Amino acid sequence: PRGGILPGIIRGKVMELALIHGFEACESALYIEDLAKAEEAFLTNSILDIVPLLSVDSRPVGDGKAGPVTRILQEKLSSYTKSGV
């Protein structure tokens, strides 16, 4: 695992979809200070797919709502998983 991150199927697909749709995607260590500066953030897992990260330590991430990149990737991932590809 890289930095404690397991090689998840959903995470890998989201990284791929991000690149396909013109978003920069990379993996790196993050700290609370990084999230405080972020416009938006999300988490991935195999049960919930993509979940917007709205706050950390009671402080909002971005405006405290799911951002446009998160919503687009949720839509693209949903289309991908429903297609059975």
Image: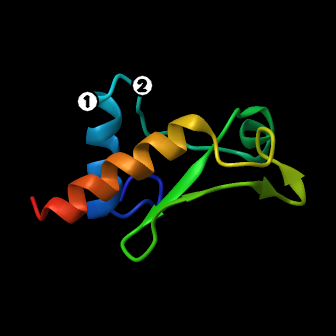
Specify whether residue 71 is in view.
Answer: yes
Q: Quadrant of the N terminus?
A: bottom left
Residue type, numbered disc 1: Ile
Indicate the position of residue 39 as horizontal and vertical percent values. 70, 32
Q: Which mark is residue 83?
A: none
Q: Residue at x 86, y 60 (%)?
A: 57
User: Is residue 46 found left or right of 9 in the rendered image?
Assistant: right
Q: Residue at x 42, y 34 (%)?
A: 26
View extreme (right): residue: 58
Asked which secondary structure carries label 1, the reply is: helix
Label 2 environment density (alpha carbons within 10 Å; few <14, some 14–19, many ≥20): few
Q: CA distance from mark 2 to mark 1?
A: 10 Å
- Can you give x and y, in whole percent of width and height, for residue 74 in the image? 43, 52
Near mark 1 (Cα within 10 A), the count class, few <14, some 14-19 or many ≥20, is few
Residue 44: image location, x then y, percent: 46, 61
Please state if 68 lies on the left or on the right of 34 as rendered.
left
Q: Image height check: is 5 above or below 69?
A: below
Residue behind mark 1: 20
SS of the residue at dot 2? loop
> Where does residue 54 sit, x and y in percent of width and height?
73, 54
Left-right relation of 81 to 54: left
In terms of depth relative to the viewer, which is nearer, 23 or 26? 23
Quadrant of residue 10 in the image? Answer: bottom left
Q: Label for residue 24?
A: 2
Q: Is residue 7 visible?
A: no
